[in-house]
Image (spheres, rainbow, N blue to C red):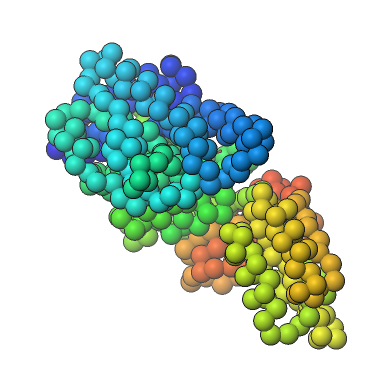
């Protein structure tokens, strides 16, 4: 019998009625002849609430929060509740269901608390239960270290749990049930003309996710791509049978017939821009700046250096995640004399808007269309970065939605699939 993994996100688990609806979708797949493992998120809003509790406790006790193993004990608990409730609901419907916590499976992870990576999922316990005809409900987002401590995988991590479970039990597919009926050309909450993509390549989905489209966690796409797990994104707000031929399949590029030059527009407001003014223009300066940030585990994204006219000095601009901005600025300020720059500027009112598409590899003029569309709306581009299948620009945050809509129109994304 084929195995299937079904994952339900926070809004799909938000209350008992939604849990009952998810249970009906699970039961239908079971009745259709699949062996089913289900991965669930906490009820929507729950993880935020739990994180806030740890913040409060941390401030009160003076203990660090990020990287603290007790942080994971608290925030992993939301998924335990929904896993138990879904298993209970399935039992009440007459199905043999059982929950298995991350430590029971076990989902073995690294010990980087708050951002752990899955190392291995020994499949034996899951497989025994599935082969016995049980529906296994696993809480997403959580795992356990080799030494038995509870971990979590970073926000949105239940997607990654689901793909990892699918790979471990060799499922035919991992179905991600969420509050939209697929992956769209851009976030449908920002552009109502966004179109659902029937298929998207792993590479494009990876770029979309890492550039801000939160419909799938980036790591889950990486894992699916590496382990060749077919992923389908679809709505949980339907009754069984209503979503046939719906959703988006994330698959290999050569399985996609209708290829687009640009498939989507992604955006991220989680950005901050730091500018170092008057750096000495000499060998080793960039290494000095970025080694200090790396030592503090701060990820740098875009980087631009411009020489001053005299050639002796340069300005350097880079972006970091917004929550790292203050720390990055403090590190640089402390190294000001050693590195020898004049001043530092921090701007947290920036956003990154990106276009993604495999067609960019073989088409010219894609960047020109992007820059023209933005200039026609009077939007100034502060930084540009590119890769083979994406172009990103940094702009004033206030123009994020305007830019997304302008780019969506410029590449005719509202006509996809029509
Ligand atoms: P879940 O709780 O099910 O994991 P998320 O909130 O993490 O759901 O992800 C779904 C949300 O992702 C959607 O509600 C939508 O607003 C957002 N989103 C962003 N970009 C896209 C996109 N390109 N296609 C579909 N949804 C997107
Ligand atoms: N509940 C976790 C979060 O809100 C994990 C997830 O939903 O994927 O980040
Ligand atoms: Mg999510």
**Residue at 49%, 41% in the rendered image:** 69
Which x, y percent locates residue 38? 32, 33
**Rendered-image quadrant of the N terminus:** top left
Q: Is residue 229 left or right of residue 316?
A: left
Which x, y percent locates residue 251? 35, 53
With respect to residue 237, does 227 lie above or below?
below
342 or 414: nearer the viewer: 342
Q: Is residue 20 left or right of residue 33?
A: right
Quarter-of-image position of residue 308: bottom right
Which x, y percent locates residue 243? 36, 31
**Residue at 47%, 63% in the rendered image:** 358
Residue extending farthest top: 92
Q: Is residue 271 left or right of residue 334?
A: left
Report the number of discs: 0
Q: Does residue 387 appear in the picture of this structure?
A: yes
Residue extending farthest front: 61
Quarter-of-image position of residue 126: top left
160 or 415: nearer the viewer: 160
**Residue at 48%, 71% in the rendered image:** 362
195 or 64: nearer the viewer: 64
Q: Is residue 374 left or right of residue 291?
A: right
Which x, y percent locates residue 93? 27, 15
Quarter-of-image position of residue 159: top left
With respect to residue 380, does 68 lie above or below?
above
**Residue at 51%, 69% in the rendered image:** 388
């Amino acid at each position: 019998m084929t195995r299937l993994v079904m994952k339900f996100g926070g809004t799909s688990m938000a209350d008992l009625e939604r849990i009952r609806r998810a249970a009906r979708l699970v039961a239908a797949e079971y009745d259709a002849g699949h062996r089913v493992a289900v991965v669930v998120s906490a009820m929507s809003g729950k993880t935020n609430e739990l994180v806030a509790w740890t913040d409060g406790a941390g401030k009160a006790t003076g203990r660090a929060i990020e990287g603290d193993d007790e942080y994971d004990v608290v925030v992993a608990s939301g998924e335990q509740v929904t896993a138990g409730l879904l298993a209970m609901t399935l039992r009440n419907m007459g199905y043999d269901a059982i929950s298995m916590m991350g430590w029971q499976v076990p989902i073995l992870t690294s010990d980087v608390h708050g951002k752990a990576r899955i190392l291995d999922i020994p499949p034996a316990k899951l497989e025994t239960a599935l082969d016995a005809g049980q529906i296994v409900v696993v809480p997403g987002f959580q795992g356990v270290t080799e030494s038995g401590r509870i971990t979590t995988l970073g926000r949105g991590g239940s997607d990654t749990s689901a793909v990892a479970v699918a790979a471990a039990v060799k499922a035919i597919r991992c179905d991600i049930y969420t509050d939209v009926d697929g992956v769209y050309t851009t976030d449908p909450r920002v552009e109502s003309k966004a179109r659902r993509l029937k298929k998207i390549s792993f590479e494009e989905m990876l770029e979309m996710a890492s550039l801000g489209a939160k419909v799938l966690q980036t790591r889950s796409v990486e894992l699916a791509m590496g382990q060749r797990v077919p992923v389908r994104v679809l709505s949980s707000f339907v009754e069984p049978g209503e979503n046939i031929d719906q959703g988006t399949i994330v698959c290999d590029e050569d399985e996609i017939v209708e290829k687009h030059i640009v498939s989507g527009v992604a955006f991220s407001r989680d950005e901050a821009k730091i500018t170092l003014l008057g750096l000495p223009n000499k060998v080793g300066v960039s290494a000095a700046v970025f080694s200090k940030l790396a030592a503090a585990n701060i990820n740098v994204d875009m980087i631009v250096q411009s020489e001053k006219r005299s050639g002796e000095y340069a300005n350097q601009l880079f972006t970091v995640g917004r929550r790292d901005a203050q720390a990055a600025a403090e590190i640089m300020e402390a190294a000001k004399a050693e590195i020898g720059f004049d001043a530092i500027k921090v701007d947290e009112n920036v956003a990154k808007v990106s276009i993604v598409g495999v067609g960019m590899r073989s088409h010219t003029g894609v960047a020109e269309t992007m820059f023209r569309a933005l200039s026609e709306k009077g939007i100034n581009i502060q930084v540009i970065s590119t890769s083979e299948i994406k172009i990103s620009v940094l702009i004033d945050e206030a123009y994020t939605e305007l830019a997304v809509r302008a780019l969506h129109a410029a590449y005719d994304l509202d006509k996809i699939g029509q």
